[in-house]
Image (tube, rainbow, N blue to C red):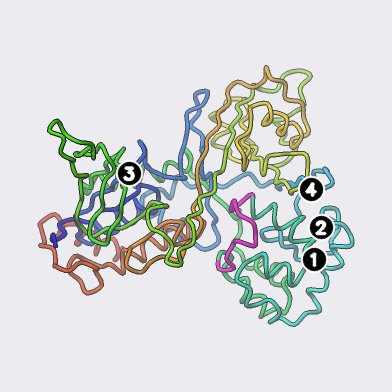
Amino acid sequence: MTTPTETIVVGAGIAGLVVARELVLQGHLVRVLEASDRAGGQVASIELAGLRLDSGAESFATRGALVSDYLTLLGLADRIVVPRDAPAWLHGVTGETLPLPAVSLLGIPSTPLADDVVRVVGRRSAWRGMLDALLPGPVGAKSPTVGTLVRRRMGDGILEKLVAPVVEGIHSTHPDALPITAVPGLVHNLLRENSLGRAVARMRIDAPAGSLVASLDGGMATLVDALLAELDRFGVPVEYGVRVAEVHTDCVVLESGHNGTGDPDAAGEAVPREKRHGLIVVAAPGLVCPVDGSPIVQTPTHVVILVLAPDSEGDAPLADAPRGTGVLVARGTSVVARALTHVTAKWSTVRAAAAGREVVRLSYEQNPTREQARRDAEALLGVSIPNDRIVAAETVTWLRAARIAVNERFVVVGEQAAGTGLAAVISHARLVAEHIGPPGSDATPVTTAQTATPANAEHAAHREKETAE
């Protein structure tokens, strides 16, 4: 068998870039292969009407300091920005658009009979939700997902009319598919307070002051820029347009066209596809099948971004943010969009750059037309948006990978192994790199120790210094 001489990371999404950085700091000779023409995966930006705008993930959760600490490590602490302190709204099944309940967590209300909850879910569902206070704390505590827990304690009405649109707007998945571990502390506080509603109230009280989400000045793609700069500083090559056809524990096989077309040569002999040998880390979904044989699921999300001309006489005052920072949409309404973000109302940095223009972002499960997006924006914002007010429009499609049971023979990072959310992806990638350890360590799944080089030693020393600081 060929002795691995480098570590190959397949995929240059956030997980791939993070694990590559961590491994090179431990002394690995790292190379990153990326099938597309850019890095970042779901963290992406576009240039639209002279503005750099997030087209993928636009923020990160601030519950816990993991992401902000990592951003600080990358020198981005002064680039962290928080959204405007304004409520999000909900477009409910009745077609009415209302502010989200004031004291809630992922839409889970602290007081189901509060007026702002009743207006959204109706009195019947609110009364069912109040049964939560009568149930013993352990009821539902072993639920595997957020949806199972909420349904057990507060009923289907609150789950589908309130929690589902919030979770789908934030995590792009139904609560029934969101692991309970995605909300750290929820079960602990349920058992402590003997009520899901009181658990939510406790978590909101204990939460640090400020917003529950944050972003970066210049957009979340600033994180990608910082990680690429780190890899460039350490001499890690990132190869774009390189598609991997097969993944093995000690090599990858490239698709046709990469130093070996796979087609017959001039003499009629088959040309073998190129193999790259090394320690393989898979950071791209779809290359490793689930160990249980289930199909690989990648769900598309279509994002439509509209740049609108400034308000003029006779226009509804969109600059006044009539729906706060945005609107989440319950299923069963006439609106096709799953959520709307009023970007210039939410982020002061974008508002300053937009110079009076308004930026609106809508997300969809099915690819919409521009006209559909315009009509949905009108319905959700409660204003008229004539076609001639749209300065620019762009639709971007990206895929989210469902979590899979990973075959232990492979080293896998990213959403498919870690679950959703930037915190989960970064934390998991760093833990995987730590488990692999330096070249030749017992934890490294490599049969022969790699030879140390001056560059490796320098990277290891930098890692020790970084850890100490």
Q: Mark 4 points at which residue?
A: 92
Q: Which of 28 and 417 lies nearest the eye of the viewer?
A: 417
Q: Is mark 1 on a helix, strand or loop?
A: loop
Left or right: residue 155 versus residue 304 is right
Work out whether mark 3 precedes mark 2 in sequence or the reverse, and give the earlier one.
3
Q: In this view, does 395 lie above or below 337?
A: above
Element class at badge 4: loop
Residue receiving disc 3: 34
Query: Circle 2 sits in a helix, a strand or a loop, which is it?
Result: helix
Residue linked to disc 2 = 117
Residue sitting farthest toward the front: 268
Q: Give the range drawn in magenta.
A: 169-181
| Mark 3 closeness class: few <14, some 14–19, many ≥20 residues within 10 Å | many
Query: Which of the two discs, 3 and 4, sits closer to the camera?
Result: 3
Q: Distance between the residues labelled 4 and 2?
A: 11 Å
Residue 68 image offset from top left, x and y in percent: 46, 56
Which three-letter amino acid code belongs to the residue tagged 1? Thr
User: Disc 1 or disc 3, which is closer to the eye?
Assistant: 3
Amino acid carrying label 2: it is Val
Mark 1 nearby-residue class (10 Å; few <14, some 14–19, many ≥20): many
- Quadrant of image for the N terminus: bottom left
Residue underneath mark 1: 111
Badges 2 and 1: C-beta atoms under 8 Å apart? Answer: yes
Label 3, label 4: how far apart the Cα atoms are:
41 Å
First in residue order: circle 1 vs circle 3? 3
Question: Per the image, is 178 magenta?
Answer: yes
Mark before the other along the chain sequence, 4 or 2: 4
Q: Is residue 295 left or right of residue 248?
A: right
Which secondary structure dominates the residues rendered in magenta? helix
Circle nearer the N terminus (2, 1): 1
